[in-house]
Image (cartoon, grey):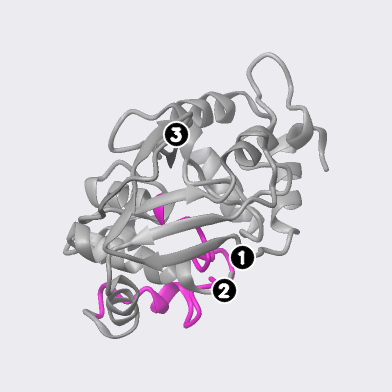
Amino acid sequence: MPSIVATGRKPDVMACGVCHRADGPGGPENSSLFGLPAAYIVQQTMDFKNGLRNGSAPRIANDLMIKLAKAISEEELKEAAAYFSSIKPRANIVVVETETVPKTQVRDLFLAPLEGSSDKEPIGQRIIEIPENVEHFVSRDTRVRFIAHVPPGSIQKGRQLAMSGDPSVQCTACHGADLRGKDVVPTIAGRSPTYLFRQLYDFKSGARKGANSGTMKPAVEKLTVTDMIALVAYSASLAP
């Protein structure tokens, strides 16, 4: 593990492993990095640095990435990208279609079950993604799995949109039939649906203006919130 991942470099380069975990599974609040093309990781970091990648709403995670991207050296970035890219992705998300979900609260930058409560509420048009073991996730345990609750019918609708919907929306055209990416196109299979939803929304709003935004913008501009939930539920349900 490169030192930039393990310990970072004071004062402004936080260790990559603090947020993305030691071998890159990340969480709903940020991207999983394991198995992504190294060139893609470098490009996205540069987009943060150059003001091309922002969020549709203020987020601490984005602010931290922008600060890091401006301070990290080219060699450090290449080391971190090569490291995460070399790690084989593993399944750490279970997608569950359901009408009701546990009541949740915001803990740090992610959702967790409401402490001391077993109450449930209608899911509505939401994704409720929570760690199976909250304390292990807070402690940066890279083995933690997540349960992603989505509205009933989401996975099948997402499959139809990704494969046989409007040609401009077909995710498989760029990300491959199994959505595992190819060349510098990132894999989106088996990744956090909460994170992926934010990216679709940011492409649609124009908050993401990086190198791949010209391709993504037309693909998402017709999508409704329900469509985006369905697409990410389907992609998250696939083997990484």
- In the shown orientation, is residue 106 left or right of residue 43? left
67 vs 152: above or below: above
The residue lying toward the viewer, choosing from 96 and 194, is 96
User: Of circles 1 and 3, which is in front?
Assistant: 3
Residue 216 location, x and y as percent? 33, 60
**Crowd rating for badge 3 (residues with CA inside 10 Å; few <14, some 14–19, many 20+):** few
**Quarter holding the C terminus?**
bottom right
14 vs 166: above or below: above
Circle 1 sits on which residue? Answer: 91
**Quarter holding the N terminus?**
top right
Residue displayed at 34% across by 37% down: 55
Circle 3 sits on which residue? Answer: 115
> Which comes sooner in the sequence, label 1 or label 3?
1
Residue 211 location, x and y as percent? 43, 52
Do we see residue 83 in this rendering? yes
Residue 79 location, x and y as percent? 76, 43
User: Of circles 2 and 3, which is in front?
Assistant: 3
Which residues fall within the magenta stretch? 167-194
Q: Quadrant of residue 112?
A: top left
Q: Amino acid at mark 3?
A: Glu
Task: Residue 239: give its label.
Answer: 2
In contact (CB < 8 Å): disc 2 and disc 1: yes
Q: Main secondary structure of the magenta part?
A: loop
Residue displayed at 54% across by 47% down: 43
Q: Amino acid at mark 2?
A: Ala
Q: How far apart are labels 2 and 1 at the CA level?
A: 6 Å
Q: Residue furthest bottom?
A: 164
> Which comes sooner in the sequence, label 2 or label 3?
3
